[in-house]
Amino acid sequence: MILAALLLIPLVAALLSWFARAPRAMEKINVAAFAAIFVLALILAAQVLGSGPVSLWDSFLYADQISALVILLTAFVALFCAVYAVGYFREDERAGNLSEEGGSGDSAARKLRQYYTLTPLFVFSMLLVTTANNLGVMWVAIEATTLTSVFLITFYRKVTSLEAGWKYAMIGGVGLAMALLGTVLMYYSGYMLMGLDTLTSLNWSMLVDRAGQLDKTTMRLAFILVLLGYGTKAGLAPMHTWKPDAYSEAPVPAAAMLSTATMNCAIYGLVRFYILASRCLGAEFPGGLLLFFGVLSMGIAAPFILVQGNFRRLLAYSSIDHAGIMVTALGAGGALGALGLMLHMVFHTVTKTLLFFCAGNVYQHFQTDLFRRIKSGVIRSMPVTGTVFLMATLAVVGMPPFSLFQSEFIVLRAVFAGGHYLVIVLFILFALGIFAGALIHIGSMILGPAGESPAVPWYPWRDTSVIALAAILIVIGFWLPAPLLALIRGAANVVTGGL
Amino acid sequence: MHFSLNPEFGNRMVTLMAALVLVLQLAMTAQRWLVTNIRIFGLQSFLLAAIAATIGVFNNSPHLLAAAGLTLGVKAILVPILLERLVARIEIRQEIEPLLNAPVSVLIGGGLTLIGYIVAASFNRPDQVPGAAGLGHNTLAVAISLFLIGFFTMINRRKALMQVLGLLSLENGVFLATISLTYGVPLMVEVGIFFDVLVGVMVLGILIYRIRETFESMDVSRLRRLRG
């Protein structure tokens, strides 16, 4: 029941927003809907913790610990982004960023309606990814996350945002076609085994019990195709090129969701296939591929962060780096790797959302996202945003008091335990490069002598969401609530099969 | 009609149609007129629907007939109509020069077909089943070739609409692979995929229209402001 409600609420919210006339009403609908979804996600997590996997409709929908964790993160990000979006778009409206220059296009109200209608649909498709038991339905849902977010990226209708939207749709389209072929091959191996022409022979919960008997050649090819496909969606190098464009052109709340919730969904898809592949082929084959793409992503991200001139693109490259770390954790395997992956997913989601919010505040104040235009001294005109931005940057590059340090350390231990010493050397090398690059660029933008820009007033919607998230970030550096930790451990157990 | 339910006859039909599908895909790599390419794609989808229907009739599988109906409705009729209306609205008919000229493109297409056959031959399949149940298993090579040539078209063509057609024919390759390997995927998934294809075409169409409005061109190679 709870799974159906989770999927129904965003659909209703999208419908209501479409018919609402005033932007204020759309804001309320979105915030209320995402608050309700977050509560439901908490209840679902409690249920899964209490009594194991939940399923509905002849196990068409299925949620185990991994699903519950990713759903919780999606709901968390969606709620924060909905609150932040209220302040963000009101500021946009006030600054006149929503009205077209030529005057021929849509009015501000129409653009806002598009945003507030598409966002619940976008969240719906992400929730469907994590609740669908059938791997084919999961593919359909991941494709739907692309389709619903294209117009979020082209929201401002600028030349550059159209370019970003086009690249996103085309690169994503090719990637997902590969993933579809991989899914079909997976179906083929299940079909050869069970000979059922029914929906259930693509059900993950069904396949996982029989993974050892699946055809190995087919499984190998299927895993490679799915890794390329969902890896494109997660932004792994070398399929990452859409990412900096999309994140720097989309409105900030949408970019925050893309870089955390959507990326988690793509990683989730990879995890599901990894579990099947590792049960069928052993951990070496899928693990080796994952390590390769993981290290490559970190390696591509490092130089681009070092020479980056735009802070929203810098955040995008940081997302590529963290996608690489998560995939490396999965590839390292073992109980430690799985635990590192799940912890990293949680910590990255909180940290990166906060970073995007800070970047949005700075962007709206200075009307630019280039370091050379802002120069320095953000902390003097924007004390709250500046402080939090610097803190979140320290967190995202993995400085010790913050939580990402812990998860990266666990990942490194997992890689060490696996005996991949070259990976460790490269991991540390690239992490150092990213540490230096991000800290120099963002540090010198925030600190230093003040520019001529005036002090910023208190923006209730945006600043409260920034402060609340910053508080959460500090707290999880030292203490995780016991149920959340249990859920993370449970999710890691699903990956390793309870070893 | 009993004579036509001879599996040998069905097998020849399917092989012939699969060959035609491949020929159309090669023609698309060489053809420069947008409207012609859209019609080639429509015809290709129609043939795919016919393949699915033939196998469906011979194996008495209503599920494959449903998939054939969906292909016919969505990819052979609806998508070409939508794309042709888009071409009429943006008033561009001819493709600018692709990166590689027509003869070279066809040659590369032929090379990719060869790769498709090699991959399909090395692919592990259960023993060839004689009679109706084995129908269509030999089309896997065509499916892989469609996938590869569609991919090549997307790289080779600079017009946004041609890239969309490349993506769609690539998806046709996946559809043929599902028929060839498993006689289609579960209907629920099939419906979802077709829904995504339809919405995808609409989304890309709107995007092309806006790009055309803004750039006065559909040349995707001009989309190069975002770097680094």
Image: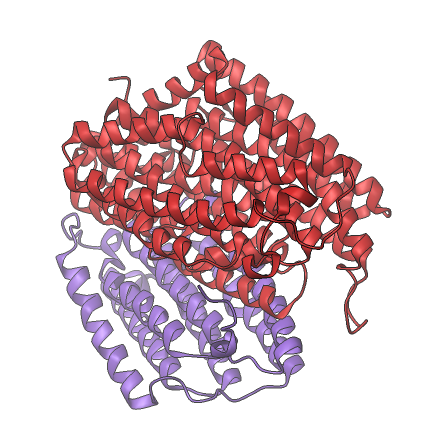
Chain colours: A red, B purple
Q: Measuring from the top left, give residue A196's x and y in whole percent.
A: 32, 37
Answer above or below: position of A123 versus A51.
Answer: below
Answer above or below: position of A432 versus A337.
Answer: below
Please indicate whether residue A313 sits to the left or right of residue A359 in the image. left
Q: Quadrant of residue A416?
A: top left
Image quarter where the N terminus of chain A lies is: top right
Q: Measuring from the top left, give residue A443's x and y in whole percent.
A: 51, 45
Considering every residue shown, the one lying at the far right of the view is A22
Considering every residue shown, the one lying at the far front of the view is A449
Front residue of this view, candidates A465 and B177? A465
* Residue located 45% across and 44% down the image: A439
Q: Quadrant of residue A28?
A: top right
* Residue located 15% across and 50% down the image: B124
The answer to whether residue B97 is seen in the rendering is: yes
Q: Quadrant of residue A16?
A: top right
Front residue of this view, candidates A271 and B66? A271
Q: Measuring from the top left, give residue B42's x and y in whole percent.
A: 48, 73
The answer to whether residue A132 is seen in the rendering is: no
Please indicate whether residue B194 sits to the left or right of residue A400 in the image. right
Q: Measuring from the top left, give residue B50's x and y in whole percent.
A: 41, 66
Answer above or below: position of A249 versus A91.
Answer: below
Please indicate whether residue A146 sits to the left or right of residue B26 in the image. right
Answer above or below: position of A430 versus A498.
Answer: below
Image quarter where the C terminus of chain A lies is: top left
Front residue of this view, candidates A424 and A289? A424
